[in-house]
Image (spheres, rainbow, N blue to C red):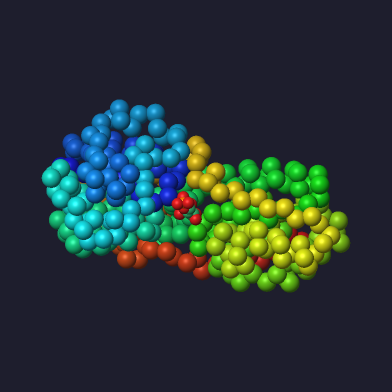
């Protein structure tokens, strides 16, 4: 394989630049031509390509976001869109593509490589949601949960000063992994996640217990996909049933998607970027490179999509006990 491309797709994640850097430098090291695709699948469809050299990826390992831009492409979900993409890929002489993205990106890649088997594709899990099967962590997750921890530590200062109850909503789409780990790390009174049913009455009991123990500075972490409908709705319901504390809401939003990637994310991104190129050279195709228990593992795209976390009951029990 002499000519590969690399693109970032879906929601951006800190560490994507470190990953692009590793793909480009590994490819060049092995004598390959490396092409960057601008704005994910949109770039394939529009033929928006950049020649990449060692300098193209200099001084980016520490930067959040993606120098290649990213997008969620509706057109790539159509056969016509994918045909346009294929024609450009073919015209460029691109033989393999490294796709850094999440489950939606891999679903698209799976269809594309079925339609055009002469183009080989390896995926790398780049999303803050950490909701892919075949890797312990996705690139961006560690940075995102540390961003949440720092933000909630700040919120706890004012919650304590005013003795208020804060509902903090975090990202994760319909997965609760950001909420779960950051909730434990900030000592949340409760962690509400889509994977488990939220019982408002149980929540009120927990809050009453904390009030009696004269706890001050209460924080509840709410995953945006939680079944109770999000932080504003839950806060309103709780305020009506529990008036001893003034409730406030903080929606962390897209600050979770930016920032300097942590060391963990930079190293994971670099390792998977390297392994994806080696995988292509070895003839691997339609698979995601992941890291499981410290080992690199390739998983077929069909097995990586949206892995609804089977919640570890012990972790939830720990969170409950720690909130007493
Ligand atoms: O998939 C990553 C993610 O940040 C989700 O956690 C979130 O729900 C979604 O992207 C937000 O999408 P957008 O950036 O298009 O608003």
Pinpoint residue 184: horizontal percent, then vertical percent: 64, 55
Pinpoint residue 258: horizontal percent, then vertical percent: 50, 41
Res 77 → quadrant: bottom left
Q: Is 16 positioned to the left or the right of 49 in the image?
A: right
Vertical side of 65 occupied by 79: above or below = below
Residue positioned 61% across, 72% down in the render: 197
Pinpoint residue 11: horizontal percent, then vertical percent: 42, 50
Vertical side of 146 occupied by 78: above or below = below
Residue positioned 33% across, 44% down in the render: 39
- Say how many tags the image has: 0
- Looking at this view, is 241 or 63 the one in front? 241
Res 102 → quadrant: bottom left
Q: Is 127 positioned to the left or the right of 56 in the image?
A: right
- Looking at this view, is 116 or 133 the one in front? 116
The reply to whether residue 277 is visible in this rendering is: no
Pinpoint residue 219: horizontal percent, then vertical percent: 71, 54
- Looking at this view, is 219 or 275 the one in front? 219
Q: Is 3 positioned to the left or the right of 258 in the image?
A: left
Q: Quadrant of the C terminus?
A: bottom right
Residue positioned 81% across, 47% down in the render: 162
The reply to whether residue 60 is visible in this rendering is: yes
């Amino acid at each position: 394989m002499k000519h590969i491309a690399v693109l970032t797709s879906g929601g951006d994640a800190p560490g994507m630049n470190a990953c692009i850097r590793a793909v480009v430098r590994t490819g060049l090291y092995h004598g390959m031509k490396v092409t960057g695709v601008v704005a994910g699948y949109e770039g394939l469809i529009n033929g928006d390509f950049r020649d990449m050299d060692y300098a193209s990826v200099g001084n980016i390992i520490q930067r959040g976001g993606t120098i290649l831009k990213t997008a969620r492409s509706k057109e790539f979900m159509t056969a016509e869109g994918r045909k346009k993409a294929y024609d450009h890929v073919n015209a460029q002489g691109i033989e393999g593509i490294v796709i850094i993205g999440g489950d939606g990106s891999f679903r698209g890649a799976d269809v594309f490589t079925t339609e055009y088997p002469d183009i080989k594709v390896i995926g790398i899990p780049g999303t803050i949601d950490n909701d892919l099967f075949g890797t312990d962590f996705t690139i961006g997750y560690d940075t995102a949960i540390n961003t949440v921890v720092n933000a909630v530590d700040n919120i706890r200062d004012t919650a304590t000063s005013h003795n208020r109850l804060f509902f903090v909503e975090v990202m994760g789409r319909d997965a609760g992994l950001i909420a779960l780990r950051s909730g434990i790390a900030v000592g949340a009174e409760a962690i509400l996640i889509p994977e488990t049913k939220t019982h408002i009455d149980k929540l009120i009991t927990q809050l009453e217990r904390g009030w009696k123990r004269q706890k001050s500075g209460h924080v509840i972490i709410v995953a945006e996909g939680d079944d109770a409908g999000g932080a504003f709705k839950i806060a309103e319901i709780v305020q009506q049933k529990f008036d001893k504390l003034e409730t406030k809401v903080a929606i962390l939003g897209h600050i979770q998607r930016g920032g300097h990637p942590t060391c963990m994310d930079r190293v994971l991104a670099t390792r998977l970027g390297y392994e994806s190129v080696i995988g292509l050279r070895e003839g691997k195709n339609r698979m995601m490179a992941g890291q499981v228990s410290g080992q690199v593992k390739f998983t077929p795209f069909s097995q990586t999509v949206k892995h609804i976390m089977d919640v570890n009951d012990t972790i939830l029990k720990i969170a409950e006990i720690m909130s007493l």
